[in-house]
Image (cartoon, helix red, strand yellow):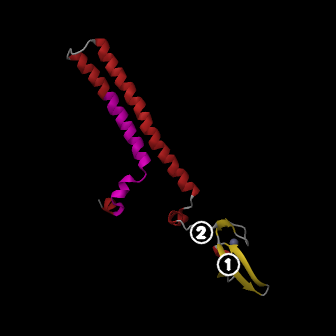
Amino acid sequence: MTEFRKRGLIGLFRHIGQKVKGLAAAICVIGILGAISTGVSLYLTGVLELIPCIAIGLGGVVTSWLSAWVLYCIGDTHVKVERLESKLIPKPAYAEYLAGNAPERGACEICGRTTDLIPAKIEDQMGVRYRKVCRECFAANNATEAN
Ligand SMILES: [Zn+2]
């Protein structure tokens, strides 16, 4: 209950692909059992002959199975897109990416490491230089932010 309060109503819709896949499987099983029991009960109560009852049962089974494919495919696609999204966008930068002000990424011009870059103004005995550097090199060179 506390977990529900913490995540709120939106939490019910997180990782929706996995839930849609489960729903597809549930609908498939319920549909198949429903079609078979409908066919059997129509035959046992004598409403229809044997052949139409078998046709209703088999038709229901095939229809449930095929329509579950469509729903499962939608859920599975969402799961894979979500996985790709989390791989392509590094987690700490994700909120900034969503807000549209992601920091520039690339190779640090001092150490070469690929990371978020800071435009830096470096002043030392060699003079003044402007470089795009990583956070560590920014601190190590006593740089000030250049814009
Ligand atoms: Zn660096």
Q: Kindly identify which numbered label has been placed on residue 100.
A: none
Locate residue 7 relative to residue 144 in the image: left or right: left
Q: Quadrant of residue 38?
A: top left
Amino acid on which the number 1 mark rests in the picture: Ala
Which residue position is annotated with label 1? 120
Task: Decide: is 17 above or below 43.
Answer: below
Relative to residue 46, is residue 116 depicted above or below? below
Q: Are marks 2 and 1 in contact (CB under 8 Å)?
A: no
* x and y percentages locating residue 8 in the rendered image: 33, 60
The one of 96 and 135 positioned closer to us in this rendering: 96
**Was residue 7 drawn as part of the magenta stretch in this picture?**
yes
- The x, y position of residue 128, in whole percent, is 75, 84
Which residue in the structure is indicated by mark 2?
A: 103
Residue at 32% over, 16% down: 54
Residue furthest left as drawn: 45
Which residue occupies the extreme bottom position in the image?
125
Where does the magenta region start and end?
6-33
The quarter holding residue 46 reads top left
The image shows residue 102, relative to residue 38, as above or below, that is: below
